[in-house]
Image (spheres, rainbow, N blue to C red):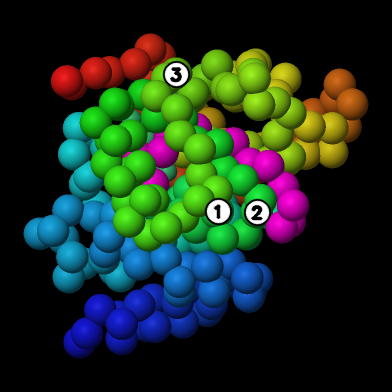
């Protein structure tokens, strides 16, 4: 089966699993996932599984990317913050659905590789930063939407503070790998309304940065 045929099969699967937002489905169709995974995993790029991307990290499962993107209820004019760029796939999907994506990664090498992919694909509305995403990006706050793609025991306070009034934040929260749930926070002034979405399994949110040279 060609990659294109596998992609169509995956998008159909996602639709059956409850991804009803057409703009999300079409963004998933337009971003080639094979570009974001190592060469030896190309043939698995359109399987609904997470895959290794080096440095002990993973590219998220397509259904998780799809559900999180849909749950963000994006608008074309929105400014979005992503914590945990990884290979850049989620950021690339978001970039098709909002005005600008600000994405932070603590591994310098992963960040550089993601930047190269964005350039190659001529995506011009993603801004990257090497740093500790738990601190957010205060110079660019507030953000209409915030998406965290690594798990912490609770949502970092700095991120809540950088969420715009009326904004949504999505993050996996849990004490360990096997006890995580995706939560969605909606900000109303100084109040945060919290909603549990689904059980998930993400790599941990780690403090500080890593520079492998
Ligand atoms: N969004 C990615 C998934 C990345 S996996 C995708 O589209 O596939 C989670 C990423 O978060 C890893 O690359 C990890 O290095 C990064 N990470 C973990 N803790 C972080 C932190 N405090 N700040 C920034 N990035 C972090």
Residue closer to the observer: 188 or 26: 26
61 relative to 203, above or below: below
Residue receiving disc 3: 132
Q: Looking at the rendering, in which quadrant would you find the C terminus?
A: top left
Residue closer to the observer: 141 or 53: 141
Q: Looking at the picture, how far across and down is residue 198, in whole percent?
A: 56, 49
As drawn, the residue found furthest toward the left would be: 40
Q: Looking at the picture, how far across and down is residue 161, in whole percent?
A: 72, 20
What is the spatial separation of the Cα atoms under label 1 and label 2, in whole angstroms? 6 Å
Residue receiving disc 2: 98
Disc 3 crowd, CA 10 A, few/some/many (<14, 14-19, 20+): many
Q: Looking at the picture, how far across and down is residue 37, in whole percent?
A: 24, 55
160 relative to 87, above or below: above
Q: Residue at x 62, y 59 (%)?
A: 97
Residue 111 lies in what quarter of the image? Answer: top left
Determine whether the beta carbon of the residue marked 3 sits less than 8 angstroms from the nearest atom of ligand 1. yes
Q: Is residue 213 left or right of residue 89?
A: left
What is the spatial separation of the Cα atoms under label 3 and label 1, in whole angstroms? 20 Å
Disc 2 crowd, CA 10 A, few/some/many (<14, 14-19, 20+): some
Q: Residue at x 45, y 74 (%)?
A: 29
Q: Are marks 1 and 2 in contact (CB under 8 Å)?
A: yes
Q: Which residues are magenta?
A: 75-88
What is the spatial separation of the Cα atoms under label 2 and label 3, in whole angstroms? 23 Å
> Residue 94 bears which disc, if any?
1
């Amino acid at each position: 089966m060609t990659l294109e045929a596998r992609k169509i099969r995956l998008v159909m699967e996602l639709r059956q699993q409850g991804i009803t937002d057409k703009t999300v489905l079409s963004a998933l169709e337009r971003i080639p996932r094979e570009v974001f995974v190592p060469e030896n995993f190309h043939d698995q790029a359109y399987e609904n599984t997470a895959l290794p991307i080096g440095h002990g990290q993973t590219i998220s499962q397509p259904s998780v990317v799809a559900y999180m993107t849909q749950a963000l209820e994006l608008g074309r004019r929105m400014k979005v913050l992503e914590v945990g760029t990884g290979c850049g796939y989620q950021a690339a999907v978001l970039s098709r659905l909002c005005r600008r994506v600000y994405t932070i990664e603590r591994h310098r090498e992963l960040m550089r590789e993601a930047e190269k992919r964005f350039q190659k694909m001529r995506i011009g509305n993603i801004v990257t930063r090497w740093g500790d995403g738990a601190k957010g990006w205060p110079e660019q706050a507030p953000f209409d939407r915030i998406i965290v793609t690594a798990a912490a025991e609770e949502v970092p306070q700095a991120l809540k503070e950088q969420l715009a009034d009326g904004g949504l934040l999505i993050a996996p929260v849990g004490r360990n790998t096997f006890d995580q749930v995706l939560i969605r926070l909606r900000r109303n002034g100084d109040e945060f309304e919290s909603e549990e979405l689904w059980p998930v399994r993400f790599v941990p949110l780690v403090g500080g940065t890593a520079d492998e040279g």
